[in-house]
Image (spheres, rainbow, N blue to C red):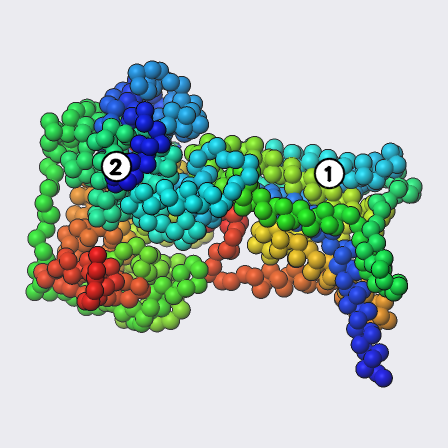
Amino acid sequence: MSETTDGLAFGSLALALLGGALRVSTPFLFVSLGECITEKSGRINLGLEGTLVLGAMGGYGVSLLTGSPWLGVLAAGLCGVLMGLLHGGLCSLPKVNDIAVGIALMLFGTGLAFFLGKPLIQPQAPMLPSVELGAWSDDEQIRSALRINVLLPVGLALAGLLHWAFRASRWGLALRLVGDNAAAARALGYPVVPIRIGATAAGGFLAGVGGAFLSLYYPGSWNEGLSSGQGLMAVALVIFARWNPLRCALAALLFGAAGALGPALQSQGITAGYYLFNAAPYVLTLALMAASWTPGQTLAGAPGELSFTQR
Amino acid sequence: MDALTHTLLAADVQDRGAAVEAYRVTKRFGALTALDEVSLKVEAGSFHCLLGENGAGKSTLVKCLVGYHPPEEGSFLVDGREQAIRSPRDAQRLRIGMVYQHFTLAPGMTVAENLLLARGDLPLRIDWRREKAALAAFLASTPFRLDLNARVADLAAGEKQKLEILKQLYLGQRLLILDEPTSVLTPAEADEVLGLLHGMTRDGRLTVMMITHKFREVSAYGDSVTVLRRGKLAGSGKVGELTTQDMAEMMVGSAVFVATAPRRRAADPERKTGEIRLAVDRLCADNDRGMPAVRELDLVVRAGEIVGIAGVAGNGQKELIEVLLGQRSARGGALRVDGETYGATRAELRRHGVFSLPEEPLRNACVPTMSVAENMGLRDFDIAPFSGGWLSLRFLRRGALTRRAKEWIEAFGVRPPDPSAAIENLSGGNVQRAVLARELSGAVRLLIVANPVFGLDFAATEAIHRRLDQARNDGAAILLVSEDLDELLELSDRILVMSEGRIAHQVLAGYVDVAEIGRHMAGGAGHGTGH
Ligand SMILES: Nc1ncnc2c1ncn2[C@@H]1O[C@H](COP(=O)(O)OP(=O)(O)OP(=O)(O)O)[C@@H](O)[C@H]1O
Ligand SMILES: [Mg+2]
């Protein structure tokens, strides 16, 4: 008797975690894929947290003005492109450090979003529609867990596409070359600076789209506490995923599940340590970073031009 | 070689090697004029050698020619027609290719990816199966053997050099420029590579322009030479009409003596050596990838002897040196200097008089962005007379550092003679000299040296060998790791052969059998060396 209830509880916990992973992971996924593109070109953009928040604000505003959430997503992406161009452009000036610029842009992006987003806190903008993957089931719990946003499959497909492109497309190879050895790229006649700026802009676009997901789907409103550092954690996630887009996708799902741990346990009636469990993604970040680092070894797969891999 | 020539012939029947001329080329770096109205002429299908002392401007000249940094004044003529070469793309269009002095491969990518990226006209979507088959076919037509799927970071230096040359052959260049291509190769590998390229020039298919410090290669393969001295044209001529002596004099600008045979006879086996300075006991260490590189290695270096370590690069020499210098931690075993446990701390280095010249000194022994004077002071900037004064707060005395740097620059012939220049802007050979000045000027009791004359011109090579010899005669214990067997034979009192992280063979200088050493280097100790 008690065994079946235990089984039931466990099943619904797993389901809640799965639902959470599918819901929460999308911004992680987009930001980390964006960061992956940028880092493959040899630069780190720590400003994606700011891009994420600015994208959330811009996307929400445009959705409110035009009535189309998809135009909102596009606008969020364009906000990201602008931020990316700013980062890429600044870092191309002599003696400018990409990490410092990233931190500045993180503060700039969030600050700008809060400033421009003041009038957006009250009104309700049209939201992105969801897809019912669980329509076959009568179980409400399953249906709610499998209710996802179109952006998730788009992001997963993008991960596959990037994985292929890094290996077998002209752009992917050129990008990796520039990120691996800039001097060699220059000697072979590849335009290093434009490729890096382009990669940072593309990364910004994806981070912006990730922001639109936050404001237009889940949690689905605009306020100043919208992002809880997803943009920063996504950077760590890229390192953990060893600059591989497929592993980025897996890691994003894992982080999503970790983020859903607190609410899922609460829905099971376990309220003790709610805030502790909410910290799961951050603890996971630290634990994974510590575990994936081996003393005396250089990070396998790290682009050679990244400022922290250079000796 | 024939097969290669044939594929290239089939690819484009019309192609001949390019004729190239430089006319009054001037290149400045800030106040420094690296090239001053230099002109040179390379005939189609010839094997041209470019000579000059360290810092003469050889690399700068060829970098101008391939558009890496375009010159301020002057022009280039290809096949008699003036061409504006403003970027590597322009050079590529004219099918001028260069193998740089420093590797220009992407270490994180595979051999196949590196070859393909060099081609420049990649399709948007790459059909790897077809490309790999084509690359394999190309590779099979050359005498080089490389794994297309290997990551470049995992290749040995010699293999990387082969890949660099393969890359240019793959592009079907008409003019191939090589910047000290053989400095990382064993003599046999060098002969193989240069022989192949020489053959291609004999067919008129290729023009080769090679920068080198080795007169042997010039007389074996060169048709004509151009000599630079301090940024100016010092002379040129046909190889057959110039003696080694003539070329050396053009390089330094005055009469010199060039040793053609090894100066030192083999060391006297009865020579008395002193007490044990360095004892390595069952040392184990891992490489960057966590694989064992040094395996239970034992060795001893005594006062007043040079112990040479021979071996093919990548057999643990690099890791051994890094452990001895404190750059890498050992996984097992013990190090003792003067009988005391040694952990390569600054205090221990000072107490025991341990000095070193690691390979790639710019990376391993310098702070690239700091000045020459500061780099020269890295060993002792924190002790008197270079720091001190008021309340014993140990202020840095820049004046003293600069004064000493000036003396060393003078004594070791570092160019440009400017103590405030950032050391990363010095030519490869001059970085080497600056570091040597720092390491050889103190009271040396134990000296650890790796490839000390890598990329140095003949005069500097002579000078450094003399200094090592002198240090040994003054009672220093010297551990010398070198990929150049001739250098080891010339300097060492004892030669150890290192293979797969162990000492595979040991021989006293008087009893060396080169073939035997070669066999142990190849790892075929005793049985079946089968070539
Ligand atoms: N990027 C640079 N900035 C400033 N100075 C430079 C730069 N590149 C070269 N130089 C200077 O130009 C001079 C010529 O250097 P170059 O590298 O051409 O010498 P080299 O003849 O190739 O010498 P080596 O035999 O040591 O390679 C040197 O004095 C060097 O310090
Ligand atoms: Mg040079």
Mark 1 residue type: Gly
Residue at the image point whose x is 36% and y is 42% from the top:
B138
- Is B513 left or right of B360, judged from the image as shown? left
Badge 2: how crowded within 10 Å, few (<14), some, or many (20+)? many
- Is B118 left or right of A238, judged from the image as shown? left
Q: Position of residue B306 (x, y in %)?
A: 19, 58
How many labels, in total? 2
Q: Quadrant of ligand 1?
A: top left
Near-viewer residue (A268 or B206): B206
Q: Which mark is residue A62?
A: none
Residue at the image point whose x is 38% and y is 60% from the top:
B326
Comparing marks 1 and 2, which lies closer to the viewer?
2
Q: Position of residue B167 (x, y in %)?
A: 37, 39
User: Would you name the residue on which mark 2 appears?
Assistant: B197
- Is B346 left or right of A92, judged from the image as shown? left
- Badge 2 element: helix
Q: Is mark 1 within 8 Å of ligand 1?
A: no
- Is B523 left or right of A250, judged from the image as shown? left
User: Would you name the residue on which mark 1 appears?
Assistant: A77
